[in-house]
Amino acid sequence: MNPAQPSPTTDSHSTRQLSNALTQVDHLVQQGCAEISAIAQLALAWLETPKGHRHLDVVARALQSIRDSADTLADYAGTEAQTMGCGSAMARTSWPGLC
């Protein structure tokens, strides 16, 4: 067997690791997207109430929660990708002044 090629056992182990990591990332992304969707729906419903436009702080907190959830998803997915030897070359950046 060529030493540069992975053995079938190593290849199977790597495939299993990748599958497990992808399953975990999928689970977290599904939960995170459901959370983001629910928060957005609540914020939109709030804006449809008579108080909604007078108390924009509620919407601001919802938007902050959405941002935090998105950041958590991006960080987790990026960490998992790097652990598996993958990942985007483009680094995630924050908008200046919105931290």
Image: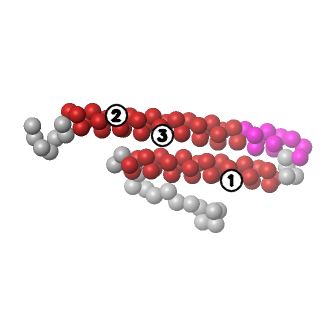
Indicate left or right for 74 with 34 as reference.
left
Residue 42 location (% of width, % of height): 75, 40
Magenta-drawn stretch contains 49? yes
Looking at the rendered structure, the kind of residue marked 3 is Val
Quadrant where the C terminus sits is: bottom right
Q: Give the extent of the magenta segment.
A: 40-51
Indicate left or right for 48 with 36 as reference.
right
Indicate left or right for 54 with 73 as reference.
right
Of 48 and 60, the residue lying toward us: 60
Quadrant where the N terminus sits is: top left
The label number, if any, that marks residue 16 in the structure image: 2
Residue 17 location (% of width, % of height): 35, 38
Mark 3 or mark 2, which has the lower sequence index?
Answer: 2
Looking at the rendered structure, the kind of residue marked 2 is Arg
The label number, if any, that marks residue 64 in the structure image: 1
Residue at 81%, 53% (x, y): give it: 56
Residue 23 location (% of width, % of height): 45, 34
Q: Residues within 10 Å of mark 1 (few under 14, many from 20)?
A: some
Which residue is identified by label 3?
A: 25
Magenta-drawn stretch contains 2? no
Indicate left or right for 60 with 69 as reference.
right
| Helix, strand or loop under label 3 | helix
